[in-house]
Every structure is written in C-alpha cells, then in structure tokens.
Image: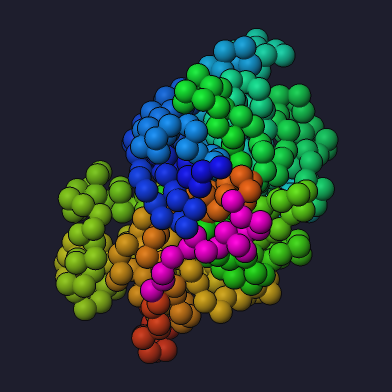
Amino acid sequence: MTDHILVIDEGTTSTRAMLFAKDGTCLGSAQRPLTQHYPAPGLVEHDAAEIWALTLECAREMVAQAGGAEAIAGIGITNQRETVVFWDRRTGEPLAPAIVWQDRRTADLCEALKAKGHEADVQAKTGLLLDPYFSGSKIGWALQNWPQLKEAGEHLAVGTIESYLVWRLTGGARHISDASNASRTALMAIGSGDWDDGLLGLFGVPRGILPEICDSAGELGMTDAALFGAPILITGMAGDQQAALVGQGCLEPGQTKATFGTGAFVLTQTGSHLPKSTNRLLSTIAWQLDGKRAYALEGSVFVAGSLIQWLRDDLGLFATSAETEGLARSVDDNAGVYLVPALSGLGAPHWQPGARAAVHGLTFAAQKAHVARAALEAMAHQTHDLKTAFAADGCDWKELRVDGGMVANSWMVQDLADILAVEVERPDFVETTALGAAMLAGVGAGLYGSLTEAAVMRGKVGRFSPAMDADAREARLSGWKDALGRVLA
C-alpha cells in the first residue's frame, strides 16, 4: 500500500484537490474558482455540475502528479456544509441550482415555524436552531417550489456536497453522508445518529431521497475506474469545520479551533459528551468512527473573509486582501470607526437573519485605512461575542487554534489574542481543513490506527500572546457593543 492521500476540498468560493504524504507534507495542489450566483437579494446558488467538473479536473491533476491511481491509498473529502444538491439518480445530473449555506430564502418559513413553537423541539433533537442556514428548510422549500423535483419522483436524490461528490465518484453506487455533515441538516437526531421522522415531517422531506448516514472514516466507497484509470478507495469524509477541528489536533475535550474563511467558525471539542447550549450556540457531531460519535459546541459567524472580498472587489478599497495588514498597521487606532459585517445577517450568538451591515463612527478624519482596520477588528469583536457565549455554556477557551485564509494576516491574529485575552496558536500549514480530511482518510485507509496517531501529520505552530492592556481592550469592546446594538435595534 502506498502512503499518498488525495484530498478533495470543495469550498464555497473554490474547489481544489491536494496531495499529501503520510507525514503530512503537502505534495501538490490544484484549485479552481467557483462561480457565485446571486439571483436576488438574500439568494445564493451554485451550479453542482460546475462543482463536479472542476473537482474532477483538480483530482485528476493530483492523481497524475502522484504517478497514477495505484499510488493513492485513499481519498478524503471535505466540503462546504449545509449547501444542498438535487440530482437525477439515473444520470447524476443536477435537477436544480444548489442552494448555498449562505442563502436566506427560507427566513420566513423558519420564522413561521418558530412562531408555532417548534424551535425548542428542533434544538433538543438536532442541537441546531431554526434558521435558513441549515439544510432542512432549504430542501423543504425546493420540493415545494421547483416542479422538476416533484416530476423526478423516485429518481430524485438529495444530499449535501460530499454526498453528491461520492455519488459521482462512485458512478452512483453510493448515496451516503457522513455523520458530521448529516448533523448540519436539522433532519438528524444528533443523539441517535439517524434521520428523525418528526423532523422530516416538519420540513416536508421524504426519507427516501436522503443518503445513508455513515462513519467519517473507513472504506466508504470505490471510485469508478474510468475516472482515474483505476479504482481508488474513498476513506474519509467530514464537513469543512469538523475537518479543521481534526486538522488542528483538537482531539481532547476542551480544545478549540477557529477557522477564518468565507465565514468564521469556532468549535470546541466535547468528546462523547453531547453539549446543550442555553446561549444560542450549536451542538454538532465532530466525527463518527466505528459508530461512536464525538461532539462539539459550535459558533458560526456568517461573514469573515467575504467581508474583505467585498471591500476589495465591490468597493475597490484595495487591490489585494493582503494589503489590509499594511493598512491596519499604518494607523494608530480605528479613529472610532466600527464595522458590523451583517452582509448576510448575523449568526451566533445573535441569529438575526434580517440584520444588515453598517459602518458606525465615520467622520472626515476617517481614512481608507481606518475602514480596513475596522473590518479586521470586526473578526476579533465577533469572536469575542462567541467566547462570551461559550463560557456561559461551560466551555471557556484556555487557548485558541486558528486557521483559514485570513490568518495569514499576522496583525489580525495578534488582534484576536489581544481582544480575547488568550494565547492564539497558528500552524505553519494553515490549510487545516484539507489536513483534517487527510488525517481521517489516513485512518480509514489503515495508514494510522487512530486520529491520535494521525496527529503527527500536523506540523509546526506559532504563538501570539495578548499584549493589549485591559483599559484599551474594554474601550474597543464598548465601541463594538454600541455599534452592534444599533444594528440589532
């Protein structure tokens, strides 16, 4: 058996494949941008056919680099969560646009279900809240509003991104979803690990269109030999944030990671203990191995890196995202400018899908650099709101491990340490989502006997210690609370 691992990392703004050695060394990467479709305000869609085509292109590049399919011990898949694909079982072709996790079209439906008193039951069963973020309401809406799905009848298949990719990779032989992804649908009972008939009825989703729920590692399927010249085992799967939790080595209860990508996602691992939040955080499955589930408490911020992208591409404040670090360092403070990035509503712990973004405190003294700095500061402010909620739920952070594209910005990482007043750890290899998928695939392929053994794949780390005095920290947080309060009002 070879020790190469192929990872498919299908994200919100791009799809890519990466090749890893057994020791965690990244041997290569192929990446393609993904088209974003915004048919109306609040609506976000992807073309699943494009996702499949680009994924296959990238994967073939890495298989060729490895020397052929025979050189790959296993494939690990990690993916944007909650995004839903609808396809024809006969052809594998999508029947409708994929509804992306950021999409808010079911906000009214979720509010109506809340008004009828359903949220407490949904939270008790799933660990989630009634929000358009999760897949269940998206599926129910699509079944009611897209006639072609009804017309497909028994030929309709529905699943999240990893489910669709496995279907296509195996030539339709496997319709599965790993437990970490299934736990994000609001259709699975998180304690039992199976679809819940009451939830299926609430959202109007037939059980027969959904995938089988499986472990996050093991022999999960075999690729069609025609795709890569020979079959390759699929041996690991996890939603992107759970994969990052693994990749950050958060294998003991209490360890916490934050990923700053399109959004920002914080997870604290809680082991076999299923956390119950009273502060509007989420309970989720971190991974499932041999039928045993490990859980996590999660806080999800909808807008992080996408804020910087918007300021760059739509407002033209800077040419590259990397410029924000220099801009932030070029001024002594934020000049009283605070940016509340509710461009697609506010996630945890506020859960206000109707909230809208605002820049507060602008004067003639404010420059472009102050707005850029306020955007970066918003990452620490939003994360501090989450830290407060985690602590209230009994999961205070002793340190924070960070990853994702934004943490290449050292000014932002130091600001996190300062505002959170905890040590922040940044690995040298920040693509921990892909690394976590590689670790799971390594376990599933038998290269490692456990995730603890696979943790040797994680490389060196750097540390950022708090350096801001308490008065300055409180002044920043006071300004943020004022700006946030105006948005929430």
Q: Which residues are magenta?
A: 447-462
In depth, the one of 181 and 206 nearer the eye is: 181
Q: Quadrant of residue 17?
A: top left
Relative to 106, residue 259 above or below = below
Q: Quadrant of residue 148?
A: top right
The image shows residue 332 at horizontal and vertical percentages of: 21, 78
In depth, the one of 319 and 373 nearer the eye is: 319
The image shows residue 423 at horizontal and vertical percentages of: 46, 79
Would you say residue 120 is visible in this rendering?
Answer: no
- Colour scheme used in the picture? rainbow
Q: Name the residue rendered at 42%, 44% in the picture.
A: 19
The image shows residue 470 at horizontal and vertical percentages of: 42, 89
- Work out which residue is located at the far front of the displayed protein and give it: 1
Would you say residue 285 is visible in this rendering?
Answer: yes
Relative to 209, residue 73 above or below = below
Q: Name the residue rendered at 25%, 43% in the picture.
A: 314
Question: For residue 61: magenta?
Answer: no
In the displayed structure, does residue 330 sit left or right of residue 140? left
In the displayed structure, does residue 479 sit left or right of residue 153? left
Location of the N terminus by quadrant is: top right
Question: For residue 451: magenta?
Answer: yes
In depth, the one of 59 and 269 nearer the eye is: 59
The image shows residue 328 at horizontal and vertical percentages of: 23, 69
Q: Name the residue rendered at 29%, 71% in the picture.
A: 411
Q: Name the residue rendered at 79%, 32% in the picture.
A: 201
